[in-house]
């Protein structure tokens, strides 16, 4: 499987992660922290690409939290990544 880190050249610090209200509420209910999300983006694997999603293309990613809980994440990437051909 393709790694997210390979897609973004391994440097998550170059990106701003924005959370929708719905995602923030779900994270709170499930005790998922922003550090967990960053870990998944750094070490996770891409399960599926949705290049035709509207309004932005997205990826389904699997990774694990610091407590080794599996975490599936739907990540929509912005125009910056689109312009880089991702």
Image: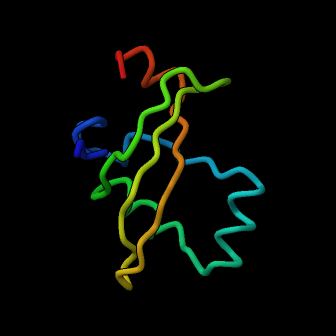
Q: What residue is at 47 percent from the left and 22 percent from the top?
A: 80
Q: In which quarter of the image is residue 30?
A: bottom right
- 33 left or right, relative to 27: left
Most distant residue in the bottom direction: 67
Coordinates of residue 35 in the picture (x, y in percent): 45, 69
- 23 left or right, relative to 83: right
Q: Quadrant of residue 54?
A: top right
Total labels drawn? 0
Q: What residue is at 42 percent from the left and 14 percent from the top?
A: 83
Coordinates of residue 17 in the picture (x, y in percent): 54, 48
The one of 16 and 19 positioned closer to us in this rendering: 19
The colouring scheme, among rainbow, by chain, secondary structure or one colour, is: rainbow
Q: Where 10 falls versus 43 (above or below)?
A: above
Q: What residue is at 27 percent from the left and 58 percent from the top?
A: 43
The one of 50 and 19 positioned closer to us in this rendering: 50
Q: Where 45 falls versus 68 (above or below)?
A: above
Q: What residue is at 55 percent from the left and 20 percent from the top?
A: 52
Coordinates of residue 6 in the picture (x, y in percent): 22, 39
Q: Where 22 falls versus 69 (above or below)?
A: above
Which quadrant of the rendered structure holds the C terminus?
top left
Coordinates of residue 64 in the picture (x, y in percent): 36, 71
């Amino acid at each position: 499987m393709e790694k997210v880190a390979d897609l973004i050249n391994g440097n998550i610090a170059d990106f701003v992660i924005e959370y929708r209200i719905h995602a923030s509420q779900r994270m709170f209910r499930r005790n998922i922290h922003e550090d967990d999300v960053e870990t998944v983006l750094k070490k996770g694997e891409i399960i599926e690409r949705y290049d035709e999603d509207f309004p932005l293309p997205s990826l389904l990613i699997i990774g694990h939290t610091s407590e080794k809980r599996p975490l599936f994440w739907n990540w929509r990437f912005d125009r910056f990544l689109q312009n880089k051909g991702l």
